[in-house]
Image (cartoon, rainbow, N blue to C red):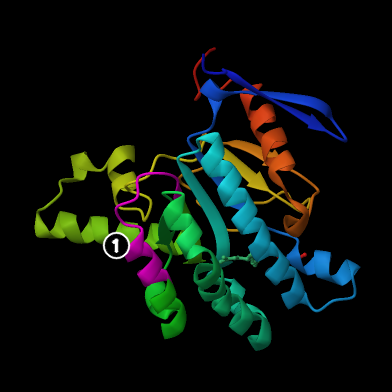
Amino acid sequence: MAHKQWFWQTKNTGDVTISKEGIPVHIAIIMDGNGRWAKKRALPRIAGHNEGMKTVREITRSASQLGVKVLTLYAFSTENWKRPKLEVDFLMKLPEEFLSTFLPELIEENVRVEMIGDIEQLPKHTQRAVQNAMEQTADNDGLILNFALNYGSRTELVQAIRAVVKDVKDGALSEQEITDATISRYLMTSHLPEPDLLIRTSGEHRLSNFMLWQLAYTEFFFTDVLWPDFSEKHLIEAIASYQKRSRRFGGLS
Ligand code: FPP
């Protein structure tokens, strides 16, 4: 008989139980705290990003095993270009590095790699790595590992509004047809369910221009753990917290 629950023994919180039935379909994560992780060890910031990349691998594996369908990871925002060139260059190499190391395993695990964000502005080498991974995993029907890369929610909304206006002007869409659902169809996430759970690491409590439309009814989980230290145990704690919530979507329970 299939087990309906998983039990986790954790050092700080004792036993954590999560139910297999209530696994969030879509988890989105703002991976924060790489810089502070490095600073605490007197290492350069890029060492924190490198360690954060390893966490991406671990959390992808855990999410896949837990039966999560979509994992969206905020890897580079439209605002991150303001960082020093050395750091930006390093961050632009990370997708390549990650995929050159882990793509065969991701394929084996039936993971499908996707991205949201403006791919055109990324360096060619980053574009090639991401495109290649997306092509090679296009037929996989397991976890969707969705990287938000050069992504900004306001830019996404501006582009959506422009496309809606164009379609109205061209007669492809009437003003009455502009509804919630229509707007969602014009976003980069049109093919994905909205996130059920948003996790932000490192103790910051803000959205930083991430999925502003899509997170309207998402449950939030904030943890002080820095992204490089975030592990399966913390993911399980976030899911356990999510499973205790009563989601009413503006109605009554
Ligand atoms: C924010 O932490 C983190 C980022 C801007 C980059 C996140 C990137 C990764 C975790 C690696 C991505 C891996 C792949 C495979 C694309 P921060 O640098 O702002 O940390 P701080 O607030 O402590 O300075």
Residue 148 visible in the displayed image: yes
The secondary element bearing badge 1 is classed as: helix
Image: magenta residue range: 130-144
Position in image of residue 30 (x %, y %): 63, 54
Residue 245 visible in the displayed image: no
Q: Amino acid at mark 1?
A: Arg
**Residue 139 drawn above or below residue 80:** above
Residue at (26, 60) in percent of width and height: 163
Q: Is residue 48 magenta?
A: no
Position in image of residue 136 (x %, y %): 34, 63
Instruction: Please state which of residues 104 and 60 is positioned toward the viewer in this rendering.
Output: 104
- Neighbor class of circle 1 (other Cα within 10 Å; few <14, some 14-19, many 20+) is few
Instruction: Please state which of residues 144 and 248 is positioned toward the viewer in this rendering.
Output: 144
Instruction: Please state which of residues 252 and 140 is positioned toward the viewer in this rendering.
Output: 140
**Residue 233 drawn above or below residue 164:** above
Residue at (51, 75) in percent of width and height: 96
Residue at (64, 87) in percent of width and height: 85
Q: Quadrant of residue 11?
A: top right
Please identify the quadrant where the C terminus is shown.
top right
Q: Is residue 63 rendered to the left or right of residue 113?
A: right
Please identify the residue farthest to the bottom as the structure is shown: 85
For ligand 1, give the image quadrant: bottom right
Instruction: Please state which of residues 101 and 78 is positioned toward the viewer in this rendering.
Output: 101
Q: Is residue 149 rendered to the left or right of residue 131?
A: right
Position in image of residue 10 (x %, y %): 82, 33
Residue at (60, 76) in percent of width and height: 91
Say whether mark 1 is within 8 Å of ligand 1: no
Q: Is residue 138 magenta?
A: yes
**Residue 217 drawn above or below residue 61:** above
- Dot 1 corresponds to which residue? 162
Position in image of residue 224 (x %, y %): 81, 48
